[in-house]
Image: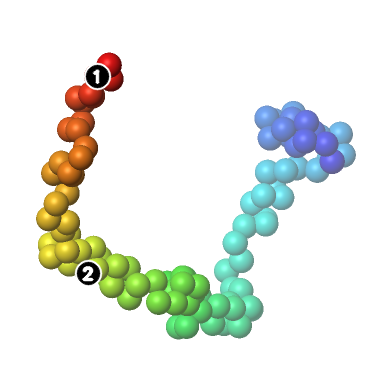
Amino acid sequence: MYPSRILRATHGKPNITGFDIRKFVQSAGQPKYDPWERAEAWRYHGIFSRWNRLGRAFPGLGIATFAFVIYVAIENRYLKDKHHGEEHHGEEPHGEEKEHH
């Protein structure tokens, strides 16, 4: 069936085939009892839940992130370069250039 016919059927114009889309949509709603509900429930609970699947996709990510944060904190606190920003011997300060004659 063409989409234009479906659109015309929803706006009240009768379909030439006698197919009423509104009745079809109402009858095709969610069933009151799903016979496969119990059989499909295992996919969304326990070790197969969304959170557990995400955690198993990246094993060690949490511990690695924690270790990296600790390393960066220790490096910034205790391992700073004491001569950073000072002038080195034989070099001119930034912004001042020697004139060559």
The C terminus lies in which quarter of the figure?
top left
Q: Which mark is residue 70?
A: 2
Does residue 83 lie above or below 79 as drawn?
A: above
Q: Residues within 10 Å of mark 1 (few under 14, many from 20)?
A: few
Name the kind of residue labelled 2 in the image: Ile
Q: Residue at 86% of width from left, 34% of height from top?
A: 16
Does residue 88 lie above or below 69 as drawn?
A: above
Q: What colour scheme does the image use?
A: rainbow
Disc 2 and disc 1 in contact, CB within 8 angstroms:
no
Task: Name the residue beneath numbered marker 1.
Answer: 99
The N terminus lies in which quarter of the figure?
top right
- From the viewer's perspective, is 45 left or right of 66? right
Q: Residue 32 lies in what quarter of the image?
A: bottom right
In the current view of this chain or complex, which residue is farthest to the front?
101
**Residue 100 % position (x, y):** 28, 20
**Residue 10 % position (x, y):** 68, 35
Q: Residues within 10 Å of mark 2 (few under 14, many from 20)?
A: few
Q: Residue 80 lies in what quarter of the image?
A: bottom left
In the current view of this chain or complex, which residue is farthest to the right?
17
Secondary structure, mark 2, is helix
Q: Residue 40 lies in what quarter of the image?
A: bottom right
Question: Could you say which is closer to the camera, residue 77 or residue 82?
Answer: 82
Does residue 47 lie above or below 89 as drawn?
A: below
- From the viewer's perspective, is 78 left or right of 99? left
Q: Is residue 41 visible?
A: no
**Residue 65 % position (x, y):** 32, 68
Mark 2 to mark 1 CA distance (whole Å): 48 Å
Name the kind of residue labelled 1 in the image: Glu
